[in-house]
Image (spheres, rainbow, N blue to C red):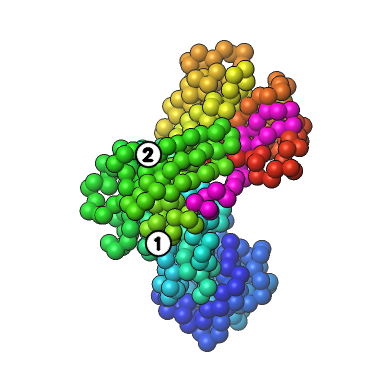
Amino acid sequence: MGVGNLKLRIADIVRVTEGELLCGSAGGFISGISTDSRNIRAGQLFWALRGERFDGHDFTEQAVCKGAGALVIEKDRAQDLINNVSIPVIGVSNTLFALGELAKWWRRIHDVKIAGITGSAGKTTTKEMTWLILNKNLPTLKNPGNFNNLIGLPISLLELDNHHKRAVLEMGMNRPGEIGRLTEISAPDVGLITRVSEAHLEGVGDIRGVLEAKLELAVNISSDAVLIINGDDDLLIEGISKIKRNVIRFGLGSDNHVRAYDIRENGPKGAFFRIRHEKGVIEVTLSVPGIHNVYNACASVAICLAMGENEDTISEALSEFRPIKGRCNIIELSHGGLLIDDTYNSNPASLRAAIELAIKLMGPGKRLIIGLGEMLELGKKSEQAHKEAGQVVAKARPSLFVAMGDHSAHMLQGAREGGLSPHVLEIAENHIHMADAILDVMKNGDIVLIKGSRRIGLEKVVDKILKVKGVSSFNDKNKGDNTHLCSIN
């Protein structure tokens, strides 16, 4: 990770991070920041972070050899690292915290309106929809990919420059305190919580822990900021009632301030609906399917209205929204079937939504094949959650259910308890095994859903299926029409 074009005085970095200049001069500048010694460029500042697998302090010599213009290290490592170093070295108590402090300062010296988005599902899609709208009229920054944590979000904020007028930032978490810290760093003018469901339980314990973690946004956001929540999420409504904030609610329920209604779904081609708000009605045509995407669009509209965007821009931008790879991408295959690539991530709520969508896409006479990887970071809930996942699969009555990962047996147990025949159940030892098992039974017109947590890497299964079955020639004739996004993670 790093920031390529950033000119900062060494003295400012020392001051903002409350650091100590251990050697070198504070009068110079750095031309960027990198946390990866492999990719650092000459003149950049190397920021040594401690991670679960690697400690950046072990790579400071490599960074110096590559031309690093300065180092930020933790003071307790100084004695080991500053011998024979001629470049400026800044010592801080905690390099991760100091990175956040630098980003917090950088955000506050730029005249920019920021939207912060968190929640158990829909964060990325809502962020992308929001950015597409806001960027239409004013230059808008967003954090890319998975740059939504205590490293990625500060790095993203440091990309701000004077031409940016807005920013939209996704905020993720694995444990308590992270959303609060990200809110403190980014100081959003508008904050949104998409929903609360069972995700990252390993770090927070249970669904109540998830709720408390997400509500850190509400607790830490400025009292002058706009707070938006999913008004159809009963647990979230209960939690927010204990926090004295003026709240805007979005959703499908009639008592929401920003409400989607008159929803007309069109299978894999998307949906048309209207969104009513305080001052009028916006007509929305999405080329992406699923009720969850109606929620995502509704959330993005609530943010953009709060940031002063006009109805025409909102409607136009949402009609242009297109798929994000691995986020429930629906791909038309050459044999007439559909492949649902939802390999980016998985949790119980997003799995249920993906299977519900797959059932809707089946139609008369169609068969469904499901390949699932395990859901990670569910802690003590893992075994039960995977049994329940198998039960959800059973309700879809797939022609084949293939599971992969340490909890495969629990998924199949749940599927058997749900009434699926053992003849349609299989445990895959690896990606090739899963792909081959699916390809062996695929027939023309089948719907295939592939979904799993990010680290399971089921995109390899998708790649092999596409290589063998091919993508419809319709793709080239109708760019964007053959692939439809239904991101729910």
Q: Based on the picture, tell me whether residue 325 belongs to the magenta stretch.
A: yes
**Identity of the residue drawn at 48% across and 24% down:** 392
Closer-to-camera residue (38/255) = 255
226 up-or-down from 488: above or below: below
Task: Tell me: residue 295, above or below residue 14.
Answer: above
> Is 409 contained in the magenta span?
no
Query: Tag 1's secondary structure?
Result: loop
Please state the horizontal and vertical placement of residue 226, each as a whole percent of the image. Answer: 33, 58
Q: Badge 2, how many Cα within 10 Å: few under 14, some, many 20+?
A: many
Whether residue 457 sits left or right of residue 348 in the image: it is right
Question: Which range is magenta?
Answer: 315-343
Q: Which quadrant of the figure contains the N terminus?
A: bottom right
- Tell me the distance, in whole angstroms, between the alpha carbons under discs 1 and 2: 22 Å
- Secondary structure of the residue carrying tag 2 is loop
Badge number at residue 308: 1
The residue that appears at 68% across and 34% down in the rendered structure is 332
Q: Is residue 144 left or right of residue 263?
A: right
In the drawing, does residue 66 fall left or right of residue 17?
right
The amino acid type of the residue labelled 2 equals Leu
Picture residue at 37% right of the left edge, 62% below the top: 189
Q: Nearer the viewer, residue 355 or 267?
A: 267
Judge by depth and name the residue closer to the eye, 397 or 301.
301
CB of mark 1 within 8 Å of CB of mark 2?
no
Q: In this figure, which residue is indicated by the disc labeled 2?
A: 252
Within 10 Å of disc 1 (Cα), the crowding (few <14, some 14-19, many 20+) is: few
Residue 302 percent location from the top left of the image: 39, 52
Query: What x and y, as percent, mark residue 300?
Result: 44, 51
Q: Which residue is drawn at 47% across and 63% down?
A: 167
Q: Residue 231 location in percent, x, y?
A: 33, 42
Name the amino acid type tagged 1. Gly
Q: Nearer the viewer, residue 273 or 106?
A: 273
Q: Is residue 176 visible?
A: no
